[in-house]
Image: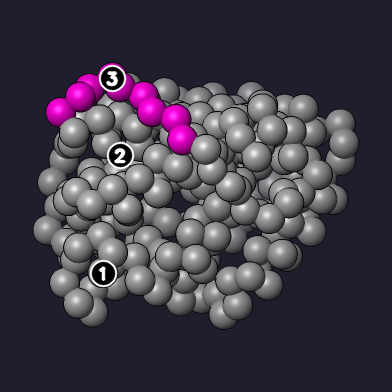
């Protein structure tokens, strides 16, 4: 599987395993992701009764409080100017929420549902791998109200599979865009850390399990 999902996933993998300081890039990413998650989650609250979105209005998935907790606990809660990519993603979420709210499912998949994968796969050892002190807990990867992350994700996939076919194209379009923007943001942050702004690297990658039917084309694009 290639496309925008692979770009974002491989960029994040490089942040973990390229042997350079990793804690600063995590904190920089959290500062930029906070307004994006805040936009998505505020929109999901407003549209909680929408016929497509109601199964996905799940406060236990919301990451904004967790991101803020990490920034406070790790001493990086200060304001920082949003990157162009962060601004683009935030504006897009609000635009979609205003005019075609059902398409928010694409952004929810690229953010909330893929976060469940990260929490399950790297959550237990992420803090140590990123270079934080022993026993540090990364709230972003911690879901205290969800017992079995794998089973919970399968439940969400079942709801995604039930999305009417007429809505697929719009959701796929937004998922492709969300994956691309998230990958671009991580690439920009890593390039800034490396002292090479604007450089984009692509690496081959393997993705997660077969996605729900509605999102398969998003991950193939």
Q: Nearer the viewer, residue 18 or 213?
A: 18
> The residue tagged with tag 1: helix, strand or loop?
helix
Quarter occupied by the C terminus: top right
Magenta range: 195-203
**Neighbourhood count class around disc 2 (C-alpha, 10 Å): few under 14, some 14–19, many 20 upward:** many
Marks 1 and 2 sit apart, C-alpha to C-alpha, by 22 Å
Left/right of residue 17 with respect to residue 134 in the rendered view = right
Instruction: Measure the C-alpha gap from mark 3 to mark 1.
Output: 29 Å
**Helix, strand or loop at disc 2?**
helix
How crowded pointer 3 is (Cα within 10 Å; few <14, some 14-19, many 20+) is rated as few
Q: Is residue 128 above or below residue 213?
A: below
Residue at mark 1: 128
Q: Position of residue 23 (x, y in %)?
A: 20, 55
Badge nearest the viewer, 1 or 2 = 1
Q: Earlier in the sequence, mark 1 or mark 2?
A: 2
**Which residue in the structure is indicated by mark 2?**
32
Label for residue 198? 3
């Amino acid at each position: 599987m290639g496309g925008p999902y692979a770009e974002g996933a491989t960029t994040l993998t490089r942040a973990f395993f390229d042997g350079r300081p990793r804690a600063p890039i995590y904190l920089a990413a959290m500062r930029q992701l906070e307004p994006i998650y805040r936009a998505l989650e505020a929109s999901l609250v407003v549209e909680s009764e929408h016929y497509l979105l109601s199964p996905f209005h799940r406060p236990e998935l919301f990451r904004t409080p967790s991101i803020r907790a990490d920034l406070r606990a790790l001493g990086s809660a200060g304001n920082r100017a949003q990157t162009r990519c962060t601004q683009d993603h935030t504006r897009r979420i609000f635009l979609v929420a205003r005019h075609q709210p059902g398409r928010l499912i694409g952004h929810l998949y690229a953010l909330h549902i893929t976060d469940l994968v990260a929490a399950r796969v790297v959550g237990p050892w992420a803090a140590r791998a990123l270079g934080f002190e022993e026993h540090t807990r990364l709230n972003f990867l911690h879901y205290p109200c969800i017992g079995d992350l794998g089973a919970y994700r399968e439940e969400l996939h079942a709801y995604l599979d039930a999305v009417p076919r007429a809505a697929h194209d719009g959701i796929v379009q937004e998922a492709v865009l969300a994956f691309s923007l998230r990958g671009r943001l991580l690439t920009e942050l890593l390039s800034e850390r490396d002292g090479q702004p604007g450089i984009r690297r692509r690496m081959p990658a393997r993705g997660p399990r077969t996605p729900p039917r509605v999102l398969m084309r998003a991950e193939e694009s």
